[in-house]
Image: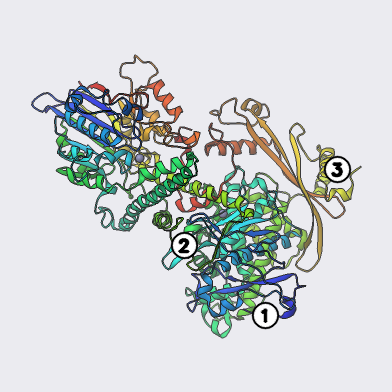
Amino acid sequence: MSNPTSLTLRTYQVGFGDCFLLTFHYPSPTGDRHILIDFGSTRAPNKLLAKLPAALPKQLKKQFPGLKAPVSASKHMELVAEDIAVQSGGKLHVVVATHRHKDHISGFATNTEGTASGNIIRRLKPDLVVLPWTEHPKAKTDAEEAPSTIENTRAFVSSLAAMNSFADAIEKEATRLIKLRAEAGRKSTPTLNSLQFMGENSIANKSAIKNLMTMGRKVAYVNFGSREGKSALHALLPGITTHILGPPTLVQSEAIRTQRSRDNDEFWTLAATAASRFVAGGELLFRDAEVSEIPPHAVWLTTRMDRMRLQSMSALVRVLDDAMNNTSVILLFEAGKARKKFLFPGDAQIENWLYALSAAPVKERNQIRKLLMDVDLYKVGHHGSLNATPKTLWGLFEHRSSDVHAGRRLSTVVSTKSGVHGRTEATRVPRTKLINALRHDSNLQNTNASQQFFLESKFDLQ
Amino acid sequence: MAKRTKAELSEKSLLRPFTIVAQDPSVRLSKKPLFTQVMVPAETLAPGPWGYRLQVIDYDSSTQTLYKAWADTAPDEGCFEDPFADSAAKDPESLLQDPKFHQCNAYAISMRILARFEQALGRRVSWQFKTHQLKIAPHAFAEANAYYSRRDECLLFGYFPGKHGPVFSCLSHDVVAHETTHALVDGLRQRFLDPSSPDQAAFHEGFCDVVSLLSVFALRDVVDAALRLTGRSNLTTKLRRKLVNGRVLTAEAMRESILLSLAEQMGQEMSLVRGRPLRASARLSPGTQYLTQAEFQLPHRRGEIFVAAMMQAFLAVVEERIRGLSAESFDDTDTSRPIWLDRTRVLEEAAKAADHLLTIAIRALDYTMPVHLTFADYLSAMLTADREVVGDDGLYGYRPKLLASFQSYGINPASDDDESGVWLSASKLEGQSKFKKLRYGGIHFRSLQTDVDEVFRFLWENRVPLELTDEVYTRVLSVRPCVRLSPDGFFLQETVAEYVQIIDLTPPDLHRVKIRVPKAISRSMRIRLTGGGTLIFDEYGKLKFHVHNHVLHARKQAERIDFLWNNGWFRDGRSMTTVDFSGLHRQRILDSPRFSEEAWQ
Ligand SMILES: [Zn+2]
Ligand SMILES: [Zn+2]
């Protein structure tokens, strides 16, 4: 049986977003196997764009000789797709979309002309597309679970859809308010910018999802421990065991989903309707009621109420952001003779990790802990936010070392852009404390600190 | 609804009537919405309504619209008319869609709760901010939420789309009463919103639910309707004949019938604003295990234990009062033989019990320490408040029932003075040999009732017997004379004063005063310790009670620091802020546990 001998990891500079191309090198006749994990961006890498096309890889420069500065953000995404096509020799084996956030899937969107980045990826004919179970087209109406939870699952999955439309309304409202301020010659505020960003990031990306569901020969909708996903991956990646550590199903995560989560699910459907229906210039609450100008004595309160409303929207959009991150697929590849371990958790936060780390049956849990202790590469969760690298997880990694020359020192990679996500010091992404710890105890690659088209690292698997 | 006489409505009368929605618009009797009339302190209102304590501003921040304010009409023949009594009878459905009615509904319920507090305390209460008027926004935003904001000096009520048109939280008696109570408790005890212990965080929520529930029992129309709507037991047998079988009115049976059905009703439409705390409380049967269970460490869940203990005591009192209605003995062995009671009298007894318990509950706030309250402290405060006006041989035994009920939920009184659980009185303290005598020399009794500096002088002079630490910041917050009315019409005069003590200490400082702190806390972190007490003086200016928390209490402060550390406080980027109700109330719906220890704070 053939074993991969090495791995090349390419981390594309996509601004705020994720895009990883893993290439496992096998002895012939197997050749190379290519896995694309996520392809999305919510804020472009402006510094890199300014250096294009000069900073393009050689092959691309040759391929697009007529390209002139400035290169637009969408053109940049096409170029990333083209480079993936080049690097993979026109054939992807596996595409993984960890969760439906824009910064993880926008690159999969297509256009009718067939020129969008999603069209380019589609032409690479992936054998397998891996998506979280929450994206299963039947999840809304049918769930491969015990009957008692079908209703819960349906409610949960439709609440995710409601979150998308709530986000849509929030993004529209933030954009409207920013425009109003601009017309009055005033700058936007950090709260409005953050609302607009978080709203935009959670809007349903129908084109990308549809493309993901149909581009592969096979689609696997996976959850913690799902066998089907594991064997589909194994068939394409000989010598590699892929452990699926998340997301847990509702049955698995019952312990952390509280009894009131049904109210929770209903809440989002309602929030979405409320936020899209009742906006300025839209439908009035009372059809025939008389309205007034705001008298001077009321201005103190109305100004505060406007501000409170924005804060409330921010709080909600943050809850929603967390909920979607927690649908992330968590993959751990164990590869080659050396059994090296590569961990890609998407944007999973502790609520998603909880099952693998502490709620799964003891035997399974102990196996997982053992695997995690031995991790060689960790893709930092959620662009380095404060709660997507659970301290329990970080504590498990045994190859952490402050010695830069240590033999098998942990490698980490973070794809992020500062000043976009998080409004206060406490919520800022990436979190300085975390970045410092990563820098201190691992070989860190940080897209935020680089203006290259992609970062490359190689791992020996023998 | 009973018609009020001209005399009752006269301009000179101290009260004026308002029609309000009895519970919320979803509660209907023969398909009609249920209204009731309440009396609130009479005043000539500016458009809003805008009165001396409340100001309604009907601004909707989601649509950025200001709805025109309801305007008062001049009293007709010296009478304040109920502005909506006619429409409630003729066209109830349109009334429910009239913003002006909404404005008055929120105003009247809020005002009624405020008046109830002032009546129980025997004095005026102030808000926890510098202005006199609390603002109310009845249609504040399109979101299923409602909350009190101290910083913004207002109550905000949201609305949201429902199956049959928008649902308005300002029309829910429960929601309006609950939020108003938050504002009132905050006015009385500012530091109850500070991060302290699981109990203190839960107390605000639980207390507001209790006030809301008990004030509903005073609305006879509502309780009557609940009795009639109860389809679960044979309670309804013969109800139409104005009789009810006293045998089925045991505390246990009433919890499962009346209380639960009221709670269900109150929770139905508003569950997305309020969660279902009342239903959960009504279902929480006695047990001493809850307090230590993980799920009951979250404030909104822990509050349910408090509500359950209060309501259990309430039902026990009602049961006893109901039994007093019949000359027949309930103790005979033939329980199948019904004992028929007059339904109106039954409702009357429930209302009286609710009213008295509400008075005790509110008055007890005056007997609590100003910082770091626990359920145990509050229980002792209630027992003391009642003993002061009702004496030792009170009818119906409220105190033993409160004590038994709280103990059945694992809450024991904080005072271990004797079996009664009341606070240790100053006179008893002075009787103890180790205790130094209190000094009153040079203290002016008149000033002691009104002047914070005079109270401070008393405090400083007596810092040794009162066990105060002098090496900390000490300040008297307020001093207020009160006149308490007992159920049998006798007056009790008291003066209540509160003080706080504050000091910021680093872990090494804390070590020196024997307060243990978690090792992980940075040695340079300054941790704020607060302590303080409430002084109750009698009508002659003698100290009756000193209810306090010592600022350097080694065990209690160590427990508190430990609890706060485990909940994510004292980490950088995180300052000690007060509870934010907008978030807390949302938490009831989105009920997610927190994992501070896993985050990179
Ligand atoms: Zn995400
Ligand atoms: Zn509350």
Residue found farthest to the top: A405
Q: Within 10 Å of the Cα at label 1, are there few (<14), some (14-19), or many (20+) other Cα atoms?
A: few
Q: Within 10 Å of the Cα at label 2, are there few (<14), some (14-19), or many (20+) other Cα atoms?
A: some
Residue, disc 2: A284
Q: Is residue B233 left or right of residue B3?
A: left
Pointers 2 and 1 in contact (CB under 8 A)? no
User: Which image quadrant shows ligand 2?
Assistant: bottom right
Identify which residue, B433 or B27, lies in the foreground.
Answer: B27
Residue A259, image quadrant: bottom left
Gap in angstroms between the C-alphas marked 3 and 1: 52 Å
Residue, disc 3: B438
Of the 4 image quadrants, the one containing the C terminus of chain A is top left
Gap in angstroms between the C-alphas marked 2 and 1: 60 Å
Q: Amino acid at mark 1?
A: Ala
Residue, disc 1: B327
Q: Nearer the viewer, mark 3 or mark 1?
A: 3
Q: Amino acid at mark 2?
A: Leu
Identify which residue, B26 or A314, lies in the foreground.
Answer: A314
User: In the image, residue B142 lies at what x, y percent?
Assistant: 48, 57
Is tag 3's residue or tag 1's residue first in the polypeptide sequence?
1
Gap in angstroms between the C-alphas marked 2 and 3: 66 Å
* Secondary structure at numbered mark 1: loop
* Secondary structure at numbered mark 3: loop
Q: Is residue B125 left or right of residue B240?
A: right
Chain to which the residue tagged by mark 1 belongs:
B
Of the 4 image quadrants, the one containing the N terminus of chain A is top left
Q: Amino acid at mark 3?
A: Leu
